[in-house]
Structure formats: structure tokens, C-alpha cells
Image (cartoon, rainbow, N blue to C red):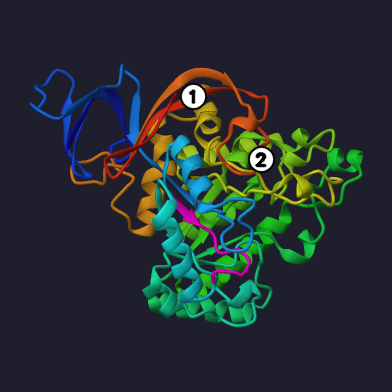
Amino acid sequence: MTIILTNARLIDPETATEFYGSVVIQDDIISQIIADGDTLPKGGEIIDCNGKYLAPGIIDIGVKVCEPGERHKESFRTAGEAAAAGGVTTMVVRPDTEPAVDSPETLQFALRRALDVSLVNVLPMAALTKDRAGREMAEIGFLLDAGAVAFTDCDAVNRDNKIFGRCLSYANAMGALVIGHAQEPVMSDGACATSGPFASKLGLPAVSTMAERIQLERDMALVEMTGARYHVDQLSSAVSLPVLERAKAAGLRVTAGVSIHHLTLNELDIDGYRTFFKVKPPLRSESDRVAMAQAVASGLIDVICSMHTPQDEESKRLPFEEAASGAVGLETLLPAVLSLVHAGHMELPVLWRALSLNPAKLLGLGAGRLAVGAPADLVLFDMHKPFVMDRFKLRSRCKNTPFDERRMQGAVLRTFVGGAEVYSAP
């Protein structure tokens, strides 16, 4: 079947351009890109985009889907519905489930569940060590064969340099990507805020941003020793950026991501002990937030992710220190990140480089591009549409978003996965 999306404002992150035109979808790929004014092919279903923006679908690295073990928080079905409504066409899911995804059998279970019920593409990551305990390397070769696209122990930072170095060496030999979390675990233990006058005023246990830099320095040294491909899941502080810059300049195969919450929120948002703003790492200063946005614009930080982490009401309705960390982000990622464009931090093609193109390159995918032959994973959105976020309207099973009741600007109109429409705004 042929679908023609006409009268669209196209965003091409590969060429960093933005232009009016049409996209022709045949079967599950983009077959033509037609400049505005050129003749459209005959036949097929025509969808008038009314001058709205059409871009490659978002590839979100680091989504937590709570199957197996905590299906009451999020399932592949509800996560897929939330992703489709948020313009996310590929979820790269974390292995920090109960039990952890550390065996081919567990990974195959997740893949089968996703294939059965998810509206969007699902790519699984696997644990780097068994049970994410940092003591014994997982079966990286078997997990690669079973479909793992990367290996990570998530926020369970490996404290043993010898074991972590061996994991990196083996992953390098197998051509596997390792994803790490840059928070020194001893300094970060028990902390729920960033050190400074504001955390002291609230009386909260806090951690210095140097904990991030120290861990990143350690990881870069081991990457240099082993030659492994390494991605830092979410940097959050300005003090870490020189370390990343030096590593890239030295030719290390290193990339970095940042979460939407550290790009759009700061430490002052936890005032009133609002636990929906409790995330890991903790929210940073406004100067750190601005530095992260500038690093994305310059290309130093490669990827923007939602770090979607569902938590139920019982785990959030607790004193701030005791409450669980994390926030849902699949549906709020796009409108939140568009605030960076509205504020003048970057242009849309640069933003989509971090949302789609770079994640696709990192994982060796053909998606993330607006090009002939690329998968027809697309999002149509109105970047100027205002609305007030209502967490109870989110499709995620858990509603723990820090953007509740916030005025936002930018809404998804349609989402296509493999040429099939999986979401249409009511």
C-alpha cells in the first residue's frame, strides 16, 4: 500500500535541513521524498499534513518496561501505547527488571511479549553482569545471539575495576556496546539532592556533581585500556563535559546521553519535597542545565532520552528521602524537549540529530533518517500547539511525571511505524 504525506515541513537530521515537501511510503519504507511544488505520484492514500512538522520517529534509549516482575507499573502494551502517543517509534528497553534480563531465556521472553503487544519497535538491552550484581559477567555472546543490542547494569555501578575491565575487554572482542551510569556509588549512596545551599536548606542528603566526574574519569580510563565501545547513559553536570571532550578528542569510542529531565528541570524544582521530581542522578543547578543544552547543540552530547522509569503511587507518596527515584517520560519527551527550540537553544534538525539519528547510528539501525530506503518510522507534530499536561491522561500505567499541570507547547498528531499508523491524535 502507498501512503503519501503531503504539505509537510520536513526535518532531515542528516543534512541538518528543514524544508516543505512530501514523503511517499510504500510497504514499510520511504520510497520518495518530493520537494514542494514537484509532481506527486498517482494512486495511494493521501494525507495532508497541513504544513505541520514531519520527522523521523524518536529512538528512545533507556526505557524501563517492568516486565517481568512489576507489570503493575508498566507493561509492553501500555509502554507501547505511551510511546506511540509520544512520537517514539523505537524503545530500547533496560534490563533492570525483576528478575534482571541477564540470560537468553529472559531476553527472549521480553522480545516475545513486545512482539505480541507493543505498537512500536522494541530493542532489548541485557545486563552486563549476572543479576546486575557486578560479580560475574553475563553471557554476552549468547545474549547477542538472542537479540541484545547493548549491555548495561543501569544504575548498579560496578565498583570492581578488574571485573568491569574484563567485561569491557570481552564486550570489545564481541563487538558489543556497553552502556554505563556515571555516578560514583560510595559518594552517591543515600543522596537524593545535589550538594549546595538549596539542599542544605531542605535538609536533604546530597551528593556533589564531582561524583559524576570521578566515575566518568574511571570509566574513560578503562575504555582507553580496553578499546571498548562505551555510551554514558545520562550526564547531568558541567564538570563532566571536559572529561567527555578529552575522551572524544583522544579517539576513544565514547558517546554520551542526557535525560529530558536534566535538560528542562533544575534543583529548585524539588522545593516542597515534591517526589515526582526525584530522579537519578538528582536534578542539578540551572547552570548545569544550560550547559547540558549547549552540549547537545554543539554535538558533544550525542543522545537525548526520556529515561522512562515508572513508579507507582505507593513508592512516590513517601518522605522525599524514602521515595523511589524516577519519572515517566515517553509521552512528555517531545513537548518537553521542544522547549529547547522555543527557548532558542537549538534548531529542530539539531534536536532530531540527538533524538533519532545519533541513537540509530549508535545501535547500527537504518532508522532515524528522512531518506529514501529508510524505515517509514515517522512522527507528525505541531510544535506550537499549547496544552496543560494532565498526568491522568497519560497512557503509561504509572503517572509519575514532574510535568503535571505544566503549560507545554508541542503535540504529536500522528505516528507511523513501518508505514503503519499507530497513533492519531483525537
Q: Is residue 54 above or below residue 281?
A: above
Which residue is painted at 55% across and 73% down in the image? Answer: 222
- The part of the chain drawn in magenta is 91-101
Q: Main secondary structure of the magenta part?
A: loop
Please tell me whether mark 2 sits on a helix, a strand or a loop.
helix
Please tell me whether mark 1 sits on a helix, a strand or a loop.
strand
Query: Residue 410, labelled with which disc?
Result: 1
Q: How far across and how far down the image is residue 71, in percent? A: 60, 56
The amino acid sitting under disc 1 is Gly
Q: Is residue 205 visible?
A: yes
Q: Is residue 251 visible?
A: no
Separation of marks 1 and 2 at Cα, in angstroms: 25 Å
Q: Is residue 344 above or below residue 193?
A: above
Which residue is painted at 53% across and 36% down in the image? Answer: 331
- Residue 249, by quadrant, is bottom left
Q: Which sits in the foreground, 281 or 309?
A: 309
**Is residue 92 magenta-colored?**
yes
Which residue is painted at 62% across and 40% down in the image? Answer: 261
Query: Residue 105, labelled with which disc?
Result: none
Query: Residue 288, labelled with which disc?
Result: 2
Q: How far across and how far down the image is residue 7, in percent? A: 25, 20
Q: How far across and how far down the image is residue 292, in percent? A: 58, 41
- Asked if residue 89 lies left or right of residue 283, the reply is left
Q: How far across and how far down the image is residue 229, in percent? A: 44, 66
The mark that comes first in sequence, 1 or 2, is: 2
**Is residue 126 magenta-colored?**
no
Q: Is residue 179 above or below residue 143?
A: above
Q: Residues within 10 Å of mark 2 (few under 14, many from 20)?
A: many
Q: In which quadrant is the N terminus drawn?
A: top left
Closer to the camera: disc 1 or disc 2?
1
- Residue 327, by quadrant, is top right
